[in-house]
Image (tube, rainbow, N blue to C red):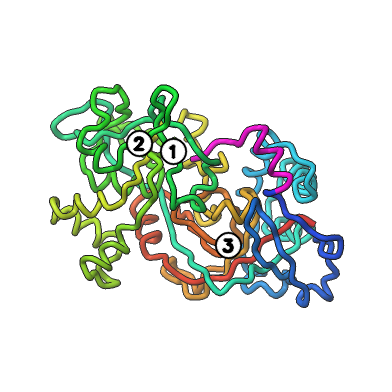
Amino acid sequence: MGGLAGFILGFFSLIFFYPDYSTSNRSEINEQKASKKTIKLKVKRRTMKLRPVRFQTLRGWQQDDHLAAFLAFQKSCRYFLTKQIRSHSPVNLKRFQICKKAVRLKLTHKREAKKFFETNFQPHRVLTSKSLLTGYYEPVIKGSRIRSAEYNIPVYKRPADLISLINDKDRAAKNHQLTFMRKKGEKLEPFPTREMIEQGALNNMGLELLFLKEQVDSFFMHIQGSARILLDDGSYIRIGYDGKNGHPYSSIGQHLKNSYKFSGAQLKLEAVKQWLRDNKSEGQKVMWHNKSYIFFRELNDSQAADGPLGAEGVNLSPRRSLAVDGSYHQLGLPIWLDVGSLSHHGQSGFHHLMVAQDVGSAIKGPARGDIYWGSGDKAGLLAGGTKHKGQFTVLLPR
């Protein structure tokens, strides 16, 4: 996951990153007229159209567990107050005051949390004809710190010569280009592709962090961006994203559909995994179609205690953390999701208040999101079955 931007990016974010409201469209909008107004929210160089709405119009708002959302939001606030890029933008100044209140509160009931959000935020519906919600999770995989005949698939840590070309939170918007390169003297050159790395391009460089049993497990760990590893001594560790080789991410699901004529049923996560295992030679070529390759770091005990880390720098909360396109959305802000067709999690529809806490190379667009379902196989099944259209409503500070 990406780190914080530096001072220069912080300066230019005054112009490009934070919402640019005209005087007549500030968030203190008369709610009697809210449904008739449309504003444009400018984040960096991208703009999305929003319409202020009332909380009462959000389907499922009254029934949601706002306390669970508040606890996730508190995590973002603690990080924001200690690590934020200093800015005098209106939204950041308001968010700063809201977060100062949030971290002091010890709420115990969802009614209190609901009142907190309604008092401090104004919902704005994202106006777009394109939307897609998918899911991701933290896999639990067996591994070892020592290479052996059983454990021989390396997990690599970040090479010292890897240079980032962008703010890593923007990697979805830049997925069409190289986002990392290798420094060779005074020059930069492309880093090896997945195929080249798996054929030995990083051998004998001392970059091995861990070793896994299966290439398929390794591949999907790269897609998820994190993992909980059960070591052969019975202990657990967590590893997280620490950069990539910079090549664009390509979906093997789309490749299997186009080149191998896979049906919708065949594209389920577990079905794809089994096909890759059963067809090792062809499966390897399919995985190499995705040239992107992820590097990992081991999280220390304090970082790993409460789940995997998202790009914002906070531990992810199951069913409350949302990966978004960072070129449209500011990490740390709440987003209401209305996904009426999503029901495989045991409920009729998915109507929940989320917090934007992560990004992903495939998450591109103002109404494109990835729901974090949790850790382990059950969460993996939920993630693999999530592919639905939905409605985004962004909560902006009053």
Q: Where does the image place residue 28, in percent across and percent down from the top left? A: 84, 62
Which residue lies most toward the bottom here?
A: 36
Q: Nearer the viewer, residue 268 or 73?
A: 268
Q: Is residue 116 above or below residue 308?
A: below
Residue under circle 3? 366
What's drawn in magenta, residue-wise? Answer: 1-15
- Among the two numbered marks 2 and 1 on one chain, the one whose residue lies closer to the N terminus: 1
Within 10 Å of disc 2 (Cα), the crowding (few <14, some 14-19, many 20+) is: many
Location of mark 2 (residue): 191
Disc 3 versus disc 1: nearer the observer: 1
Give the Cα distance between marks 2 and 1: 8 Å
Residue 398 seen anywhere in this rendered image of the structure? yes
Of the residues shown, which amino acid type is indicated by label 2?
A: Phe
Contact flag, marks 2 and 3 (Cβ < 8 Å): no
Q: Residue at x 67, y 34 (%)?
A: 8
Q: Residue at x 77, y 48 (%)?
A: 98
The type of residue carrying mark 3 is Pro
Indicate the amino acid at tag 1: Phe
Question: Answer yes or no: do the residues labelled 2 and 1 have beta carbons within 8 Å?
Answer: yes
User: How far separated are the C-alphas under marks 2 and 3?
Assistant: 30 Å
Instruction: Based on the picture, tell me whether residue 10 belongs to the magenta stretch.
Output: yes
Mark 2 vs 3, N-terminal side: 2
Q: Is residue 120 visible?
A: no
Kindly indicate the quadrant of the structure image that contains residue 190. top left
Callout 1 secondary element:
strand
SS type, badge 2: loop
Q: Please tell me which residue is depicted at 48% across the width and 35% down the height of the picture.
A: 164
User: Residue 64 falls in which quadrant of the image?
Assistant: bottom right
For the residues labelled 3 and 1, the Cα–Cα distance comes to: 24 Å
Q: Main secondary structure of the magenta part?
A: helix
> Residue 58 in the image: x percent, y percent?
66, 72
